[in-house]
Image (tube, rainbow, N blue to C red):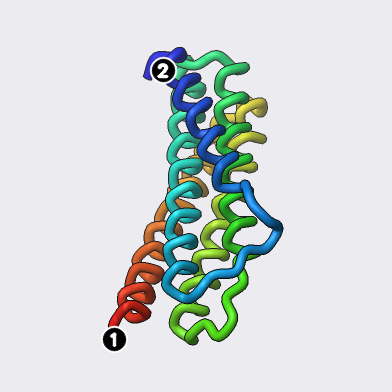
Amino acid sequence: MHPNRLAVAAAMLAMAGGLVGCGPAASRADGAAALDAVAGHLDASTSAVATTRLALQDRTEGRLLPVTADATVGAAAETATSAAHGIATLVVPDMPPEARAARQQALSAASDAVASVAQARDSLGARDPAATRRALATLDDAARSLDQAGVVVEHAASAEAAP
């Protein structure tokens, strides 16, 4: 990806992350709306992980300047953090057990995404191929975890919507 296009993507990601993080410290919702919010936060986390992976890969292959890679991963870190915060602060009185479990799995996956993005950011400056490989593997694990959590949230949302 051309560095200018990646910078534009990073700016868009930062704006989306800012929107995800807007609002009160804790938000209240009913079960269905809460699961929709969790799904949106998972999408933001997934985007942050994918953006970070792309930036790290492009930086490793010399297709991205260090400052651009750092700015891109920094914006992704903010997005991932905002998404995890959004899931953590969602308050749902009387949430059914399946929905509660789905939210907990989503929170765990989003928290792991934050850690994987942070590890990738650390590896940008290390110039250590082994550290880069570990960061890429951690990002891949986080992406799988986010995908699995998304499936669980979808299933719980379907159960919540059923009469």
Image quadrant for the C terminus?
Answer: bottom left
x then y, percent, for residue 10:
51, 27
Q: What residue do we see at 51% from left, 38% from top?
A: 16
The quarter holding residue 117 reads top right
Q: Which mark is residue 135?
A: none
Q: What residue do we see at 31% from left, 75% from top?
A: 158
Q: Name the secondary structure under disc 2.
A: helix
Q: Report crowding for label 2: few under 14, some 14 to 19, many 20 or more residues within 10 A (C-alpha).
A: few
Q: Amino acid at mark 2?
A: Arg
Q: Name the secondary structure under disc 1.
A: loop
Q: What residue do we see at 51% from left, 30% from top?
A: 56
Identify residue for label 2.
Answer: 5
x then y, percent, for residue 19:
56, 42
First reached walking from the N terminus: tag 1 or tag 2:
2
x then y, percent, for residue 101:
50, 78
Q: Is residue 122 left or right of residue 103?
A: right
Instruction: Please state which of residues 139 and 94 is positioned toward the viewer in this rendering.
Output: 94
Instruction: Please state which of residues 23 and 17 is positioned toward the viewer in this rendering.
Output: 23
Q: Report crowding for label 1: few under 14, some 14 to 19, many 20 or more residues within 10 A (C-alpha).
A: few
Instruction: Please state which of residues 7 and 50 is positioned toward the viewer in this rendering.
Output: 7
The quarter holding residue 76 reads top right
Q: What residue do we see at 61% from left, 47% from top?
A: 21
